Amino acid sequence: MTTLTNLLDFDPAQLVAYCSELGEKPFRAKQLQRWIHQFGASDFDAMTDLAKSLRDKLKTRATIVSPAVISDHTSTDGTRKWLLDVGQGNAVETVFIPEENRGTLCISTQAGCAVNCRFCSTGKQGFNRNLSVGEIIGQLWMAEFELRRTKGIEPGPKGERQITNVVMMGMGEPLLNFEPTVTALKLMLDDNAYGLSRRRVTVSTSGVVPMIDKLAQECAVALAVSLHASNDALRDGLVPLNKKYPLRELMAGCRRYLEFAPRDFITFEYCMLDGVNDSDMHARELIALVQNGNESVPCKFNLIPFNPFPESGLKRSNNGRIKAFAQILMDAGIVTTIRKTRGDDIDAACGQLAGEVQDRTRVQERMQKMAEYQKKFGENFGRIIEVPR
């Protein structure tokens, strides 16, 4: 049996090359791309301006298929979350957040996540694999045309676009799945596909510094950095990747990225954790970190009320503390916003995306074993603690 090629896996240049292999001119690739990404077509017979000979070739060699929808839930605030089957017992989550003047889609790039940030439920289920280009862009393809069908809006450029912004903030670390992520980004930006502005597409990273530099060269879009701590000692415990790329290296990477970025600032995401990273001292440390003479980083802060889950052992900062923290940053001249929690009644809020993952990294097993050891040897077993002199 011939394995069918999923055309969602191709960026514009790759689709031109594929059509060339079929003996077709480059303009056929543009026509095909518009049918797929502007009209949401998956039936080659519906692509009426393609030559019948090309349609016949495609029917025997190619397919257009996104991950199958397992479940589809809509929150009381209009947020919509899909659970998508990516095979071998793995499922990822995609979230659409409607607002008055824009619609934002939060996309996953991996089945699970190996970074294992302490405050994120995705990391607690471990990691299985990277998603393919078709599985990444397929989330946008599925969501755009499903939202149009729901509202009775016609496909094609004349129909009102439902998704105006895309954030790579779902399950996984995008920059640890670099090539498929960048290929998907190029499709999002292409005028013959989704035609999104680089300013309206955001990649969120926990701080993979070499890949931040590579992204700047290959497809510079808006950048958000999951910061969550004001010093290395604290960040080592919250974002383990910090041990490899500490704050000084991360800030230098952010400054380099801004030379190529479509926006003149970096967004720093900061999850507000009660009694952990939310004191006045932490706020002042953040100011010193980003306002540091020649090493300053033009930025805005997005403070995120923590969305609790049992395994974290963490609590959300109260509203008064979050506002006071924000005020210290704003008084220093830093643009600061407090993210409104959306979709938490369907577990679609920031840090809550879990999906279903066949864990190759055995995170749950290791966590359970650690809990057993701590019960036997004391709660500080396995932790670095400061011993008084």
Image (spheres, rainbow, N blue to C red):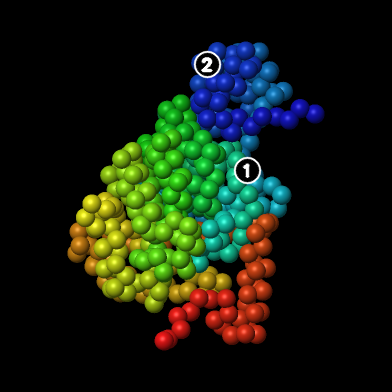
**Image location (x, y in percent) of residue 91:** 63, 52
Q: Amino acid at mark 2?
A: Pro
> On the image, numbered disc 2 is attached to which residue?
26
Res 3 seen here: yes
Question: Who's the residue at 45% across and 60% down the image?
Answer: 242
Please say if 77 is above or below 277. Answer: above
Decide: is 118 above or below 53.
Answer: below
Point out residue 88 in the picture as x, y percentages from the top left corner: 71, 49
- Tag 1 residue: 67
Residue at 48% x, 79% y is 385
Observer-nearest of 340 and 182: 182
Looking at the image, residue 230 sits to the left or right of residue 108; the answer is left
Q: CA distance from mark 1 to mark 2?
A: 28 Å
* Quadrant of the frame with the N terminus: top right
Of 373 and 47, which appears nearest the observer? 373
Q: Quadrant of residue 366?
A: bottom right
Residue 228 found in image quarter: bottom left
Q: Where residue 153 appears, x then y in whole percent?
A: 47, 36
| Label 1 vs label 2, nearer the camera | 2
Q: Position of residue 79 (x, y in %)?
A: 47, 54
Dot 1 falls on a residue whose secondary structure is loop
Q: Secondary structure at mark 2?
A: helix
How crowded pointer 1 is (Cα within 10 Å; few <14, some 14-19, many 20+) is rated as some
Specify the amino acid type for callout 1. Pro
- The single residue placed furthest to the front in the displayed view is 389
